[in-house]
Image: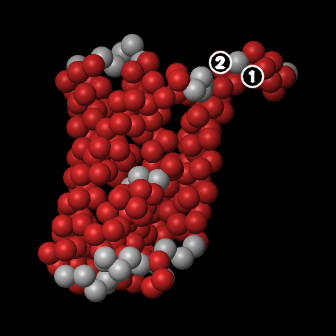
């Protein structure tokens, strides 16, 4: 049981860490805090990390209630989340990820919640998979509350890792340089596109298996 719980926590850590797109977030953080002093940058990183912890915890623990409240099927929600993640990943891989001077806040403290924490870090494409993972874990009879809680530790680890990247942003910029960070950001977009494709495919085939219409479609395809 403990081994399964640790595997679940590790899986959550890896998924969320890549969903955060750490190099993209690092690039945006450096651009948005350009000109600020090192202590203020570190202070912003710590405050943003706290906000992300709160938002992530709400999504993870209240995800099942959210789907139930609005009468949403988890597989349909998975397909929608996968499409949203695919759009975001395509923009990340092909678009411009550097804020212009007009988008930078005059007071660097003003970016902590919006736009840094939400939506740059915890955007819809990141929130939706967290809701799905939390809701799926609660509905799975093989996953008890101890495993569910240990799984949240994996999320906390991913958030802490991202917070550390932002806290040491200036050092990472000196080591890698902005161009290398941007390249890694583009590569993470490709990884997210693969994750999105898996989400869409899994949701689609699960929907076919569970619905009457889907069963008929499968019967037709089997002929």
Q: Which residue is mark 1?
A: 214
Find residue 182 and report its image quarter. bottom left
For residue 131, say whether it is visible. Answer: yes
Image side of residue 25 versus residue 160, left or right: right
Residue 7, how many percent across, how many down? 28, 33
In the image, farthest residue toward the left: 39
Quarter in which the N terminus is drawn: top left
User: For residue 166, what is the image quadrant?
Assistant: bottom left
> Does the CB distance between marks 2 and 1 fall below 8 Å?
yes
Residue at image location 58% in from the left, 72% down from the top: 94
In the image shown, does 62 or 172 lie closer to the viewer?
62
| Residue at 48% from the left image edge and 83% from the top image edge | 102
25 in relation to 64, above or below: below
Answer left or right for 118 relative to 203.
Answer: left
Q: Looking at the image, which is closer to me, 134 or 180?
A: 134
Please identify the quadrant where the C terminus is shown.
Answer: top right
Marks counted in the figure total 2
Label 2 sits on a secondary structure element that is: helix
Structure colour scheme: secondary structure
Side of 1 relative to 29 (left or right): left
Mark 1: secondary structure: helix
Residue at image location 54% in from the left, 76% down from the top: 96
- Which residue sits at x=39%, y=37%? 59
Q: Residues within 10 Å of mark 1 (few under 14, many from 20)?
A: some
In the picture, the disc for residue 210 is 2
List x then y, in percent, for residue 132: 47, 33
Residue 124's mark? none
59, 151: nearer the viewer: 59
Q: Is residue 194 visible?
A: no
């Amino acid at each position: 049981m403990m081994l399964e719980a640790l595997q679940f926590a590790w899986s959550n850590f890896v998924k969320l860490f890549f969903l955060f797109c750490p190099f993209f977030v690092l690039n945006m953080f450096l651009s948005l805090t350009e000109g600020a002093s090192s202590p203020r940058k570190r202070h912003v990183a710590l405050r943003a990390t706290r906000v992300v912890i709160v938002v992530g915890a709400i999504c993870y623990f209240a995800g099942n209630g959210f789907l139930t409240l609005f009468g949403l099927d988890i597989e349909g929600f998975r397909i929608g989340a996968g499409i949203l993640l695919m759009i975001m990943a395509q923009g990340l891989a092909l678009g411009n990820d550097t804020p212009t001077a007009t988008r930078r806040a005059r007071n660097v403290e003003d970016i902590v919640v919006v736009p840094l924490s939400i939506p740059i870090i915890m955007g819809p494409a990141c929130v939706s998979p967290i809701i799905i993972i939390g809701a799926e874990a609660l509905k799975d009879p093989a996953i008890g509350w101890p495993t569910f809680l240990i799984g949240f530790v994996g999320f906390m680890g991913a958030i802490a890792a991202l917070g550390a990247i932002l806290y040491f942003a200036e050092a990472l910029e000196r080591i890698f340089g902005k161009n290398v960070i941007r390249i890694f950001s583009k590569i993470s977009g490709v990884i997210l596109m693969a994750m999105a494709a898996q989400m869409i495919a899994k949701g689609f085939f699960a929907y076919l298996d569970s619905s009457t219409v889907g069963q008929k479609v499968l019967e037709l395809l089997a002929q």
